[in-house]
Amino acid sequence: MGLSSGLGDASSDSLPLLLLLSAVSFLSRLLSLLRLSPNSPQPSDLPSPLPSAVGSRLHSLSLLADHLSSNRPFPYEAPAGSGDDGCIFCLNRLERGDQIRRLDCCHVFHSRCLDGWFDAMNLSCPLCRSPLLPPEDRRTKAEAERRIGAELVAWLSPY
């Protein structure tokens, strides 16, 4: 009894909301159709604010993956006469048999400690800041960033 009159009021109050949602949906679909029209700008015509940041991040991930696959952890063997070998992350001495990684600059760290450094996307030696990239690869990094960025913009532009 009271329930049927309450439902009638609720449906009449929601009519403007339904009309508004229908209008928004219609306009959204119309705009998406206009973006797909032959006169719409092509991905190459659009400005690309995204490539350097996203492309750089993707290239960094690729570089890091290559570095980690070529620089596998190995057991530490103390060289003769060295007594001060320690990991700057955990401040523990490197013990015989510890899993370590050696960077191109010859600095040595526990593998798990250095992996944490790389997980934060630091692509240099934590001690001397020498880059993981050899000098000849730095030139190709810029080219790869531009290529990856352009591909991302072209791929994401329909959305």
Image (cartoon, helix red, strand yellow):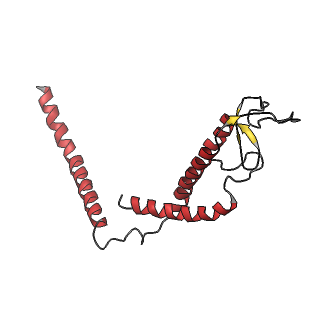
| Residue in front for this viewpoint, 40 or 27 | 40
Left or right of 74 on screen, residue 54: left
**Location of the N terminus (image quadrant):** top left
| Residue in front for this viewpoint, 53 or 71 | 71
Give the x, y percent position of residue 117.
Answer: 66, 41
Which residue does the image show at 26% across and 63% down from the upper left? Answer: 33
Above or below residue 131? Residue 86 is above
Above or below residue 73? Residue 128 is below
Which residue does the image show at 28% across and 72% down from the upper left? Answer: 38
Q: Residue furthest right?
A: 81
Residue 32: quarter of image: bottom left
Which residue does the image show at 63% across and 65% down from the upper left? Answer: 139
Is residue 117 among what the camera can see?
A: yes
Above or below residue 69? Residue 33 is below
- Total residue callouts: 0
Which residue does the image show at 45% across and 62% down from the upper left? Answer: 151
Is residue 49 among what the camera can see?
A: no
Give the x, y percent position of residue 70.
Answer: 62, 46
Left or right of 58 on screen, residue 9: left
Give the x, y percent position of residue 76.
Answer: 74, 33
**Location of the C terminus (image quadrant):** bottom left
